[in-house]
Amino acid sequence: MENNRRFENEDPLVSRSARGDAAGTEEQPGGTPEWLIHEETFKEEFIKDLGSFGEGQIVEGTIVSVAADVVFVDIGYKSEGEIALSEFNQKPSPGESIKVMIVRTETRDGKLILSKQRAEEVVEWDRLMSALRDGTSVDGKVVDQVKGGFTVDLKCVRAFLPLSQCMMRKTEDPKNVIGKVLSFKIEKIDGKSNVVLSQRKHVEELRERMLTDFFLTRKEGDIVEGVVKNIVTYGAFVDLGGIDGLLHVNDIAWGRVQDPKKYLETGDKLNLKVLTLDSQNKKVSLGLKQLTPDPWETFEQRYEKGMKYEGVVKKLTNFGAFIELEEGIEGLLHVSELSWTKRINHPKDVLKEGDRVEIMVLDFDMKKKNVSLGLKQVLPNPWDTIDQKYPIGFKASAKINTITKSGIFVELEEGIEGFLSSENVSWTKQGKNIGETYQKGDMIDVVVLSLDKEYRKIQVGMKQLSLNPWTTLKDLYPKGSTVTGKITSVTDFGVFVRVSEEIEGLIHVSHLSREKVENPSSLFKVGDEVTAVVLYIDQDRNKVTLSIKDHLNMQEKQDLKKYLEDDVAKTGSVQLGHLIDWTKIGK
């Protein structure tokens, strides 16, 4: 080719006049033309320059032309060099500058053979050695997974990246790493076949530089941009550009944040406020809510005590419910403020999370940012008119809700209870176990005895629905009268005798006979019918005391009196001995 031979058909020693250079016809003193001196000098320098090109040398060249399978490159040699087109990843263009290695200065055909790939290998290898020596990072492409790690293409060589030096997450699929171009530190070079890399050291060094730069250039209160990296139960870690900051759950929003994932997603770009900087421990705490006004600052402009508002149930606890009035403003609805009448053990009995409810602001504390709320206050209070609905003496049928040792709680209506004390259950069965007679859910008739609106208490009675049998008994059996009844029980201290349908009387062991009784059960048994004298009836203590002994004495007196009366009727006189014996009866 004409391009391949710079000096073909051209002799540098040919006179300029032969080439039509009229200016070169002048001669210097001494007889040698000036142009000839220049040509000789040029030839010597050129030959000397050719000697500077050696095989294996890397030089800079310029692409002259591109043929079907060959690229011609001018490196300043006497002829243009050739490089196989296959050494290029894409077809080059004339005029481009490239580094090449001189493979052969001249073949049999007089060609200059160059190599782009070999030059790149040498340059890359020098770069790797320099990176190992200086501790700088290199880039490479992960091309394959092998035992214990990955193969990385560093252009001129294949290097090994141990799994322990890879920043891949434990849960990440290794296939996701293949094909990525990453930066590495060179751990070791032992020939081209043994190059070991570390991505971990590169990342750690980079992170350390970023941390140092961040803490030198940032201060508390600065606004920074970050990307949500990982969301946890207590907040989120945000990538601030090589360093991580913690956005705590309490600093995401002014309101209660139970699940950060409802507010954030991985990959979200956020503007955040730097709350604290701990340069010693390299920790940064961030705030999102701090970029918006605190709703508590204007709380008193929107809320008043005694006013009704709508809210959303956010959380239920044993002692009450937290109600969100607006984002960032929550109040406590105590369990005692849920109902005027119902006994509510847990707020979940009447509320569930997410419910919208109308409530009243009862009180608030701006310093502590506390709000007390009431639910029952938005409804009429039935206790305000309870005395009109249940006046004293009012009779009602009620359901037994609770049985205790001291009495019974009965439901007059839903949420309105009355208390029936054990002493007001029966006129006669005092001290008896109520639980043996009544059960929860039983319906009983009661009468209202007393009412206290202030303390919301109603006392009811059951025995008051009937006449007091003790009053009747006293009228029926005055002191000294006789009564006949069956023995209901026999004890060591006496026997009990039924004197009426509901009342029993006690005959003490000292009154069972005129003779001393050691063991009552030897003389009496349950079911025996006896007659006794009423000694006294204690209505206040519900006690009846009887005496067989007095009845026997009384009966003997009556018999003797009748005998004397009959004797007088027959004889018309009474003997003195009889009178003396009669006076001893009953003593």
Image (tube, grey):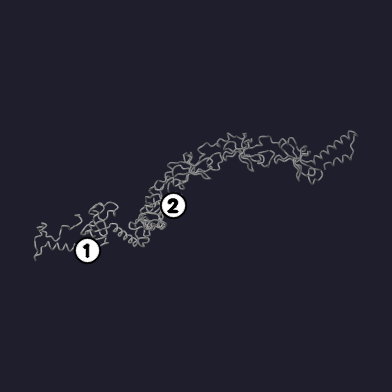
- Lateral position of residue 104 relative to residue 379, left or right: left
- Lateral position of residue 402 relative to residue 194, left or right: right
Give the labeled residue for mark 2: 171
Q: Kindly identify the residue that appears in the image at 68 percent across and 34 percent down.
A: 467
Q: Kindly identify the residue that appears in the image at 66 percent across and 36 percent down.
A: 464
Q: How far across and how far down the image is residue 526, in percent? A: 76, 41
Give the labeled residue for mark 1: 51
Query: Which structural element holds mark 2?
Result: loop
Q: Kindly identify the residue that appears in the image at 81 percent across and 40 percent down.
A: 552
Q: How far across and how far down the image is residue 215, in percent? A: 37, 56
The crowd level at tag 2 (other Cα within 10 Å; few <14, some 14-19, many 20+) is: few
Name the kind of residue labelled 1 in the image. Answer: Gly
Viewer-proximal residue, 366 or 562?
Answer: 366
Residue 461 at least partly seen = yes
Locate the N terminus and report the quarter of the image it occupies.
bottom left
- Give the mark, 1 or 2, whose residue is nearer the N terminus: 1
Name the kind of residue labelled 2 in the image. Answer: Thr
